[in-house]
Image (cartoon, rainbow, N blue to C red):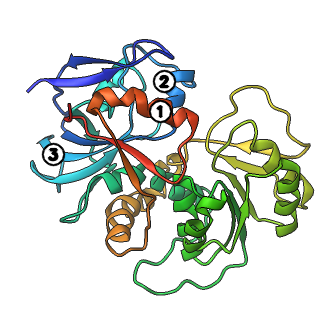
Amino acid sequence: MANLAALLTAVNTPLEIQEVEKWTPDPTEILVKNEVIAFNPIEWKLAKLGIYPLHFPAILGSTIGGTIEAVGSEVKGYEVGDKVVASKKFGQKFGADGNRFGAYQRYVVVGDVMISKLPTGLDPAVPASIMMNLTCVVGLFTGRLGLERPPLNGSKAAKKSEKILIYGGSSSFGTLSIQYLSQAGYSVTTTSSPKNKDFVSKLGAATVIDHTGQSEALSKELIAKGPYDIVVDMISLPNTIPILAGVLAAQDGGNSLYAMQPAFGPETLPKGVTRVFEPWSDPLYEDGNQHLLEWVIKTYLPQGLANGVINPVPVERVAGGLSGVNGALDRMQKGVSGRRLVAYPWER
């Protein structure tokens, strides 16, 4: 059966639905019949802002759920017919040379590392919607910053002394981070709009601050609730970075502002404050962290969802299959809070 894809032919132009090659996996790869696309915010920035170099035509998208169609000769532990979710490593071959890995198509090639078998009866849209961000959460807080992981056996973690500020608690990255950190025993202060406050509070945040008011008042309240050992801006836009940078500048010690994306242009930060960004799943691929990558994919994701340890934000279906991708990108550009968008590429 032919493979269809939503192709980006130039930055900030509508994606076009075209027939493309049905890929053959290499010995260490797997071909998946893609049944659900989970959208990640970085994708609209790639499509509309070109924040990373692209080779056109490009098939974007990072995370999928579906059924294994073919297995490479060196792959162990997976068989044709297995239900899986998969994600490519952030930055992996953006552009035409990596089109086989893009999620915006009906058949996708994935490596045998960032792929997880699904428990029976679990809707693939749910784990697919959090997979990429979940690897980034563990990569940042444990792989890079050395914080402890939460227990999955029902036991309660000992309280830790570290206090962490998460700006943007109702974002997907924010909600996963709050759960991960609070369940590991850390004290989390976060921000949210009033409509999402109750949901964010139930995730384990010790303090939830309304971030919809004036930035000056918000800054004062955040500073008053500090000091913080770690400050993370889950939104990382020109209107949020100065607020968090001001919080860091007002407290003694700790000058790193951890961000979810690089600066879009020149920015001026207070003396001693540095924006720190990298693709936060990258630490999982470093020497000594391979066990963390395996734990996230093979244990934390499936068991956390099955046991109710991970409470994802609701998913919302975008109508139109591959034709709905443009609308999803437009919506993410305007801002999506408290939900994750998914599309079904076989839907017409």
Residue identifier under label 2? 47
Q: Position of residue 133 (x, y in %)?
A: 48, 51
Residue identifier under label 1? 43
Q: Which quadrant holds residue 39?
A: top left
Q: Which quadrant holds residue 174?
A: bottom right
Question: Can the viewer see residue 229?
Answer: yes
Earlier sequence position, callout 2 versus callout 3: 2
Q: Position of residue 203 (x, y in %)?
A: 55, 71
In the rendered view, does 245 fall on the left or right side of 301? right
In the rendered view, does 269 fall on the left or right side of 48? right
Residue 68, which numbered label? 3
Write the residue at 89% across / 60% down. 251
> Disc 1 residue type?
Glu
2 or 3: mark nearer the eye: 2
Earlier sequence position, callout 3 versus callout 1: 1
Q: CA distance from mark 3 to mark 1?
A: 24 Å
- In the picture, the quarter occupied by the N terminus is top left
Write the residue at 29% across / 29% down. 322
Q: CA distance from mark 2 to mark 1?
A: 6 Å
Q: Identify which residue, 205 or 133, lies in the foreground.
A: 205
- Image position of 60 with respect to 314: above or below: above
In the rendered view, does 307 fall on the left or right side of 123? right
Write the residue at 38% across / 38% down. 62
Mark 2–mark 1 contact, CB under 8 Å?
Answer: yes
Q: CA distance from mark 2 to mark 3?
A: 28 Å
> Disc 2 residue type?
Ala
Mark 2–mark 3 contact, CB under 8 Å?
Answer: no
> Disc 3 residue type?
Ile
Write the residue at 64% across / 74% down. 186
